[in-house]
Amino acid sequence: MSRRRDSNRPHPWRRRTLLAAWLTAALVLSLRAAQIQVAQASVWREVASNQHREDQKLPAPRGTIRDRSGNPMSVTRERALVHVAPREVQSAESVASLLVEVLGVSESRAARLAGTGRGWNSAGTHPPLVREELRGVPGLHVETTYQRFYPHGDLARGVLGVVLDEKGRGGVEREFEEWLAGTPGRQVVARDNVGDPIPGEQITVEPPRAGGEIVLTLDMDLQEIAQAALVEAIEEHDAVGGDVIITNPRSGDVLALVSIQNGHSGALSAVNTSFEPGSTLKPFTVAALLKHDLASLSDTVDAEDGSWEVAGRLINDTHTEGRMTIREALRESSNVGIAKAAQALVPGVQYENLRDFGFGTRSGIELPGETPGTLRRPGEWSGQSPASLAIGYEIAVTPLQMAMAYGALANGGLLMRPRLIRQLRDADGSMVEEYEPEVVRRVLDVGTAEAVGRALVDVVEDGTGTLARLGSFQVAGKSGTARFSSGGRYLPGEYSSSFVGYFPADAPQLVVFVKLDRPRSGEYYGGAVAAPVTRATMEAALAANSLNLGELLASSRVPRRRVPADMTPIFAALPLEPALPPLEAPETTGEEGATSRSVAVPDVSGLPARIAVRHLHRYGLRVEQSGTGDVVRTVPPAGSQILPGDTVRLRYGSSHHE
């Protein structure tokens, strides 16, 4: 009798198959383990190590931006970034007390920082001195970081720009980002099992390299003067905004550039916004006529009693004139006279003349967002265009273009490229590159430029620009008033008022451009609104700028003479802080009084730096300063007799007395 097979027992071949599978799996796992532990041991050790370390970027200090005299205008300050790790804190109460004492945080915040949270709590940035006071305290970690700082507040903010998220935004900060930023370093940080850094386990692999320095052509004193004058003018005339530019016509150096729009001092409308210049363009029409021997200043033109129709458009003057010379037409700013004289210019010549002076093209200044303005080619002109262009319409220019074009009239006919950057230096101050003055082209011969300049002196002496006159030096200049346009249409009752002048007229050292946008209080004519601002700026510049004193004295319209002791210097025209009492006129020495160049150093002790500087400028004194706070004393001391143009050094301190 055969035995029946147990159906629950597996067949022998199944057992053998299962055993073989288990043996194969064990062999594969053993081989893989051997591969990991032997052949790939170094690879997997590195993977494990990387899970507990991290590469971190070490910030680089950003380079300093300085004015032409080396005064810092944009600097980077080292700061201590403090973190609190509650899990590492041994005594939350003592750490909180230390945070209150050293960092000045509130008690409630200090308690939260020291006692709550599993990760790191940020206690903010603080002066680097706190590093020593917090060193070695369990649970407190201090990192080095940097902050951008502007020692003079919003002065030149539009030119400088700002730094946000470690990147330059606007101005020189943006245009020279790569040069200023430097190169970040790198460190390796060890972390524990929960990912927090392990104290003392940082290794610097590559140190950061500081950014380079930039020396601008800006003069901090002139920038201060220009900004103060523009702020005062905007407030006085209830204007929406405006621009002031001061340049050196010989080098093309931009000494001051201020734009304010809707109360914002960080604007850069002097470079990136164009406007119809109106009558300030008329000198270039006259220059073209003289350059091409199409007219002389003594030639006459019929001004049509102040009203003339051309190609269906009526051109009007604010006054009625009959026949007048071209010189008189420029002096009285006759639209009809200049437009009729311009009929001698063929469109191509008129267009090329304006292009030669830099209109319709970017100047090349080292600032972002420059606009070329608008100057249409002759093929796009209408029958009215030649007359309109002659008097500053159907063309849009920037304030900077206008300042540089007047610089060409002032320097004998050379259009200069505006120079904003003077030097590039490395982090230790060694010069890397010097930016030399650059001539773009000759636009006029010397004789023609001087002839136009003499006609512009007439404008200031006896014409529409008399409010720009200086008592001691002749000024050449021209006012302009143009309808304000927005969105391609003119706004009713809205104007741009401008004035451009240079002085001394026979040996120019400065060009000053002033424009106010949409003045709504009082008059709106450029000669009444912008010319006084130009005069005040020039007067203050005589005191503050490093002008050639010998040339200035040679250009003076009056000889040096003795003056009464109570005569106030002409520099006092610049508005100061309204809350301050006026300074007394400086005393003079000698029985009959000192020469007109002798002044006494005023007492400015106890005043904030910027106010003290303005007071000293009133008396023709240059200022050298270092530090911050209130003035403690001056060198030479108050009351000392010195000459205008001499330098007074300010000393600062926490108290007003030594």
Image: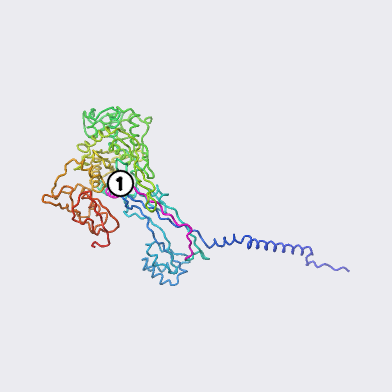
Q: How is the image coloured?
A: rainbow
Quarter of the figure with the C terminus: bottom left
Q: Nearer the viewer, residue 267 or 348?
A: 348
Left or right: where 603 falls relative to 486: left
Residue type beneath disc 1:
Ala
Which residue appears at 27% of the width and 62% of the height? 654
Residue at the far left in the pictured view: 591
Q: Is residue 405 above or below residue 44?
A: above
Count of picture labels: 1
Residue wearing tag 1: 256
Is residue 361 visible in the rendered image? The answer is yes
Residue at the far right in the pictured view: 1
Quarter of the image for residue 35 reads bottom right
Q: Is residue 548 above or below residue 454?
A: below
Q: Nearer the viewer, residue 492 or 658?
A: 658
Question: x%, y% of residue 43?
Answer: 59, 59
Q: Magenta region: which residues? A: 200-226
Quarter of the image for residue 249 reads top left
Question: x%, y% of residue 157?
Answer: 34, 50
Question: x%, y% of residue 52?
Answer: 53, 63
Q: Nearer the viewer, residue 625 or 350?
A: 625
